[in-house]
Image (cartoon, rainbow, N blue to C red):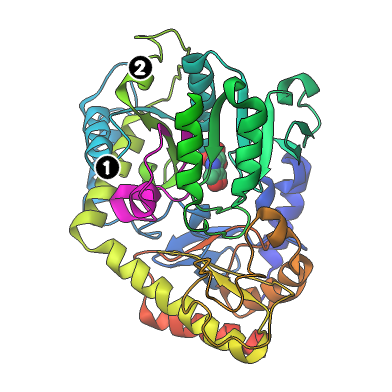
């Protein structure tokens, strides 16, 4: 495996792009491979090396790298028609109808251009709707590069987690650990009538993956109802991936007031969206006063790619395929770690998967969840499986990044380079790909 062209390109990139990349997570060590093209469930780098790809663009590519003919045709038609206009189009109405038809909490949607933009706008909308400033976020949750959520610390002792975010911006942010109902109750006891919203990933996808304990989101729902706050589910990762077209909220049986989307809903093109109850959504400009706008919002090419991707997923049994393969992958890794790394935790649901390199836990694994941690109270590892972002951060993160990940890459399996970010099975992956991945996992962990 040679990496010479990648190395040389990265060298050039370091002169013109900060860190050689346009998003920090791509700057893998010692230098990233530079992608030439995607091919189904694989990517091929500029040195001609093929990798089995489970990064899948960090989530958007539900169908993999080859657009099915009908998706390509829809995209081409909108490229040919002239890419965008700054005036309404039929395709954005159709995607809005599709989302409202399938996602339980959504009557109306505002499409934007990134997940970050979606969470920024959702927070502004919640603040505008309630007339309150405080927002509860989850430690270890990620909502994009936005000021309200780039915090460290907990409860009302939070500081900006990045230079450039003024202290005064984050004084309205309250942070609590995931899966901690006591902390959630406490923050509402102390600040209930000041809280505009709770912003939470239904399943932590950027620090973990961490599944909610039974009843956690129901508790958040009740607290929000009791205190007149909005519950915002950030489904940028889980949207149209977990729970199929109904998203994670349908699977968990909890209906938020607002939902943020990104990734899959744009079919591989830049996208974000805020969806929710009509009475709240109508407070956005131009109906209401909460300002929200964007030159590229509802971009016709993106709308076409997203709509046709979701229709294809529905018509072609994509969710059964990807969820079935990921289940087999998680079950296979569970067997492997039974033998070689009994304290590790296999996590994930639907087509999301990861292994958290947890260091504690009984050696006896009889009765652990078979294909991904479900926070089952009767599991022998319930006391030690990750419940919060902090638990994941306490895992052997360096071992993942410096020892495990490079070996998997050298074997031609491209995983997310740090311990925290989810990995994804796509429609183009096959049983043989799962076998190959399990073989590599066993070889590296044994
Ligand atoms: C849950 C969640 N919210 C928001 C974002 C931000 O989305 P984007 O990177 O499109 O701005 C991400 C990105 O990974 C995410 O995972």
Q: Decide which of tag 1 and tag 2 comes sooner along the chain.
A: 2
The residue shown at (47%, 12%) is 290
The residue shown at (41%, 79%) is 328
Q: Secondary structure at mark 2?
A: loop
Q: Position of residue 187 (x, y in %)?
A: 65, 34
Task: Classify 10 Å Cα crowding around label 2: few (below 14), some (14-19), many (20 and above).
Answer: few
Left-right relation of 84 to 142: left
Task: Classify 10 Å Cα crowding around label 1: few (below 14), some (14-19), many (20 and above).
Answer: many
- The answer to whether 241 is drawn above or below residue 378 in the figure is above
Q: Residue furthest left?
A: 315
**Spatial CA span between label 1 and label 2:** 20 Å
Dot 1 and dot 2 residues touching (CB under 8 Å): no
Q: Position of residue 194 (x, y in %)?
A: 61, 20
Residue under pointer 1: 307
For residue 428, say whether it is visible: no
**Where ligand 1 lies, by quadrant?**
top right
The residue shown at (54%, 36%) is 199
- The answer to whether 37 is drawn above or below residue 409 in the figure is above
Location of the C terminus (image quadrant): bottom right
């Amino acid at each position: 495996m040679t990496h010479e062209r990648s190395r040389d390109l990265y060298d050039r990139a370091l002169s013109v792009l900060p860190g050689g990349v346009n998003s920090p997570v791509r700057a893998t060590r010692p230098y990233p491979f530079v992608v030439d093209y995607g091919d189904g469930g694989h990517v091929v780098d500029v040195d001609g090396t093929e990798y089995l790809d489970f990064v899948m663009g960090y989530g958007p590519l539900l169908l993999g790298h080859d657009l099915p003919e009908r998706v390509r045709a829809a995209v081409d038609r909108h490229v040919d028609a002239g890419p965008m206009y700054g005036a309404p189009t039929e395709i954005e109405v159709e995607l809005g109808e599709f989302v409202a038809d399938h996602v339980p909490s959504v009557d109306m949607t505002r499409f934007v251009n990134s997940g970050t933009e979606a969470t920024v706008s959702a927070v502004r909308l919640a603040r505008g709707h309630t007339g309150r400033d405080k927002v509860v976020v989850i430690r270890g949750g990620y909502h994009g590069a936005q000021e309200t959520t780039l915090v460290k610390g907990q409860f009302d002792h939070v500081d900006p987690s990045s230079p450039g975010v003024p202290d005064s911006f984050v004084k309205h942010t309250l942070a609590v650990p995931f899966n901690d109902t006591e902390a959630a109750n406490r923050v509402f006891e102390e600040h209930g009538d000041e809280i505009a919203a709770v912003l939470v990933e239904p399943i932590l996808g950027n620090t973990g993956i961490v599944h909610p304990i039974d009843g956690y989101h129901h508790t958040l729902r009740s607290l929000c109802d009791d205190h007149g706050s909005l519950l915002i589910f950030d489904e940028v990762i889980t949207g149209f991936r977990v729970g199929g077209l109904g998203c994670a909220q349908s699977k968990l049986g909890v209906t938020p007031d607002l939902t943020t989307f990104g990734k899959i809903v744009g079919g591989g093109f830049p996208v974000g969206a805020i969806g929710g109850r009509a009475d709240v959504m109508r407070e956005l400009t131009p109906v209401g006063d909460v300002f929200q706008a964007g030159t590229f919002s509802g971009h016709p090419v993106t709308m076409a790619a997203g709509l046709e991707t979701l229709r294809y997923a529905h018509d072609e049994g994509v969710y059964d395929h990807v969820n079935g393969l990921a289940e087999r992958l998680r079950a296979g890794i569970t067997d492997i770690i039974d033998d070689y790394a009994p304290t590790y935790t296999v996590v994930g649901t639907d087509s999301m998967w990861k292994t958290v390199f947890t260091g504690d836990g009984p050696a006896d694994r009889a009765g652990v969840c078979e294909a991904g941690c479900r926070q089952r109270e009767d599991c022998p590892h319930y006391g030690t499986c990750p419940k919060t972002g902090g638990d994941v951060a306490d895992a052997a993160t360096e071992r993942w990044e410096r020892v495990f990940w490079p070996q998997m890459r050298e074997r031609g399996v491209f995983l997310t380079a740090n311990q925290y970010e989810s990995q994804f099975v796509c429609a183009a992956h096959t049983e043989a790909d799962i076998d190959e991945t399990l073989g590599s996992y066993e070889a590296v962990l044994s």
